[in-house]
Amino acid sequence: MGRRTNLALLAALSAAFATGWLAFAYATAPARWSLVLHATTGFAILVLVPWKSIVIRRGVRRRRPGRPASVALGVLVLASLLGGVLHATGLLRWWGAYTAMELHVGAALLAVPLAVWHVLARPVRPRRIDLARRTLLRQGATLAVAGAAYGASEAAVRLLRLPGQERRFTGSYEAGSFQPELMPVSSWMFDQVPVLDPARWRLRVSGPSGVREWTYEELMAYDDRIRAVLDCTGGFWSGQDWSGVLLSRLVPEIGAGRSVRIASHTGYDRRFPAGDLSRLLLATRLGGRPLSPEHGHPGRLVAADRRGFWWVKWVVHVEVEGLPHWLQLPFPLQ
Ligand code: HEM
Ligand code: HEM
Ligand SMILES: Nc1nc2c(c(=O)[nH]1)N[C@H]1C(S)=C(S)[C@@H](COP(=O)(O)O)O[C@H]1N2
Ligand SMILES: [Mo]
């Protein structure tokens, strides 16, 4: 019994972790489906709590070494669950300088090494009987109860008109749309805002056909416009009017299979497929005004339909490469 509870917990925990990141990878419909699975597997952990508490009581009596680490794991998983629910309901969206979503993901990340240790230090061997019909039915029932709990939580958010009803399909909340001075400023993790001198700044465009350096003034002469939503994985979205120059004007025709790496002054970078160039804007203006340092002055990328972490700020380099675009970490490290 305890064994199967632990295995079910392992499955739910892994699924919640994977689907959370999957949702972060999209700014389109798959984000919604990932989040339905995510919330369901997240709630499944709560459904398993009564059974797990039996395992815990037994384990605590045995006084196994490393018990504080198991307790810390419990605290972090519960903190993550709480952060997720606070974000989704909108009951508490900020905790000091951090959003509930940042705490949600931060606690989950901290829990990973403890969870790996816990499973290695208290191994549970799967048995053939775990695939028996009765067991699968029980796991299915756990998922069904979790799904119902999620459905009920979404219904409650609407019925009680909690702020969560305003969320976009990615779970993000609107902030400062078409009011650039109210648009939140965000970094993926640790990047600091550099202040760059536009007179000395250059945009270096390089590829097989050579290198061309553009000045700020030259780029400001363009007025390609895009209205787009920046949807930050930190939990906010903001619609704005951006203008600047489409990358397809700066980069000569390149074959499919090639990719374009957009790099920041800070070293932060993302790689895009060649086919995206005509939809990627190197923005020099937000709402008709030059960018502020925080929003990427002198130039930042606008990548409509991609999550905020693709919108590289303080761009200094556009580099055509022979590498396929998917040959990069799915998320930045900086
Ligand atoms: C949400 C995730 C989990 C939390 C918060 C958690 C927490 C705990 C705690 C507090 C204990 C009792 C103290 C101790 O023995 O250190 C414990 C025991 C145990 N856990 Fe977990 N656990 C989790 C998931 C898992 C998973 C995924 C497995 C294995 C696949 C597992 C296997 C065990 C085992 C075998 C014991 C010892 C039972 C005994 O000695 O009688 N746990 N867990
Ligand atoms: C310990 C692992 C995790 C658990 C147990 C968990 C569980 C949950 C729960 C219960 C919710 C609330 C759902 C609702 O009430 O609608 C939630 C929301 C959310 N989680 Fe997680 N989560 C975990 C890790 C992650 C990670 C690693 C990410 C992203 C990388 C993530 C992204 C999200 C997002 C975007 C939401 C908001 C969904 C919405 O507002 O509709 N989660 N999570
Ligand atoms: N160089 C650089 N560009 C970056 C980031 C970063 O950390 N470094 N963060 C990204 C993330 S996660 C988001 S959501 C947007 C935020 O843009 P904003 O500050 O203009 O709202 O910038 C993106 N561009
Ligand atoms: Mo972000």
Image (cartoon, rainbow, N blue to C red):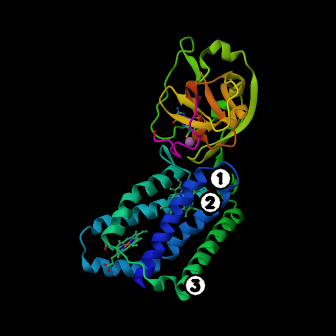
Question: Between marks 2 and 3, how big is the CA–CA gap?
Answer: 24 Å
In the rendered image, residue 45, in percent from the top left (x then y), is placed at 50, 71
Percent coordinates x, y for residue 194 in the rendering: 49, 25
Q: Name the residue carrying label 3.
A: 137
Task: Choose between 91 and 128: the one closer to the eye.
Answer: 128
Q: Is mark 1 within 8 Å of ligand 2?
A: yes
Q: Main secondary structure of the magenta part?
A: loop
Give the Cα distance between marks 1 and 3.
Answer: 31 Å
- Per the image, is 128 magenta? no
Which of the two labelled residues, at mark 2 and mark 1, occupies the earlier sequence position?
2
Q: Which mark is residue 94?
A: none
What residue range appears in magenta? 320-333
The residue singled out by tag 1 in the image is 170
In this view, 289 is above or below 178: above
Q: Are marks 2 and 1 in contact (CB under 8 Å)?
A: yes
- In the rendered image, the quadrant that contains the N terminus is bottom left
Q: Residue at x 56, y 60 (%)?
A: 19
Q: Is residue 200 above or below residue 161?
A: above
Disc 3 marks a residue whose amino acid type is Leu
Mark 2 residue element: helix
Say left or right for 310 vs 194: right
Q: Which residue is mark 2?
A: 35
On the rendered structure, is 132 left or right of 281?
left
Q: Is mark 2 within 8 Å of ligand 2?
A: yes
144 over 277 or under it: above or below? below
Circles 1, 3 touching at the beta carbon (< 8 Å): no
Quadrant hosting residue 143: bottom right
Query: In the picture provided, is 56 more to the left or to the right than 264?
Result: left
Can you see residue 72? Answer: yes
Q: Position of residue 106 (x, y in %)?
A: 45, 52
Name the residue located 62 percent from the left edge and 77 percent from the top edge: 144
